Amino acid sequence: MRDVLSYDPETGLFTWIGKTGRSTRIGAIAGNINTDGYRRIRVQGKTYPAHRLAWWFVNGAWPDKEIDHINGVKDDNRICNLRLATRSQNKQNMGAIKGSASLLKGAHWESARRKWRSTIVMDGKIYFLGGFLTPIKKPPQPTP
């Protein structure tokens, strides 16, 4: 791997330093961004997630957990932006689900009850926090 790829931990970019095929251009940024927003790099017929490769390049071992992008930017593979995480930890910094009516994490519209439902998941267990008339609880206003 180190014979064909170079990794810059400051930028998070991989560049080709050796040929892996006819289309490999020495000095070019390696890989492509997939539909999920992650950079993938193909070497010798196998595709690798760039964030896992970055961890391996810096630490010398393949990560035994998930790799979390701290800032949530899936193509920011600077080593300072990567950390080992459990599945639960990795999910905690996810944004709202696309297409969600509320655009809030943990809140969704429950049309049968005509209320907003709030739930969280911790250690694989779902916790129901309640049903609400609005997606955001407004703080109490001070009395004059």
Image (tube, rainbow, N blue to C red):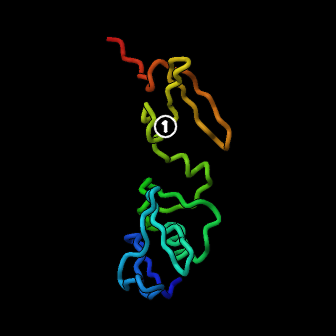
In the picture shown, does residue 19 fall above or below 97? below
Residue at 52 percent across and 79 percent down: it is 43
Furthest-left residue in view?
A: 144
Q: Position of residue 48 (x, y in %)?
A: 54, 70
* Residue 105 percent location from the top left of the image: 48, 37
Q: Is residue 108 left or right of residue 85?
A: left
- Location of residue 110 with respect to 10 vertically, above or below: above
Please rate how many residues cluster around mark 1, counting C-alpha atoms within 10 Å: few if below 14, some from 14 to 19, many from 20: some
The local secondary structure at tag 1 comes to loop
Residue 73 x, y percent position in the rendering: 41, 56
Q: Nearer the viewer, residue 60 or 45?
A: 45
Image-quadrant location for residue 144: top left
The quadrant in which residue 134 appears is top left
What amino acid does circle 1 point to?
Answer: Lys
Classify residue 70 as left or right of residue 119: left
Mark 1 lies on residue: 105
Give percent across and percent down for residue 57.
52, 77
Name the residue rendered at 50%, 66% in the picture: 51
Residue at image point 35% right, 83% down: 27
In the displayed orientation, state which residue is furthest to the top: 144
Tell me which residue sits at (48%, 68%) in the image: 40
Q: Nearer the viewer, residue 3 or 112?
A: 112
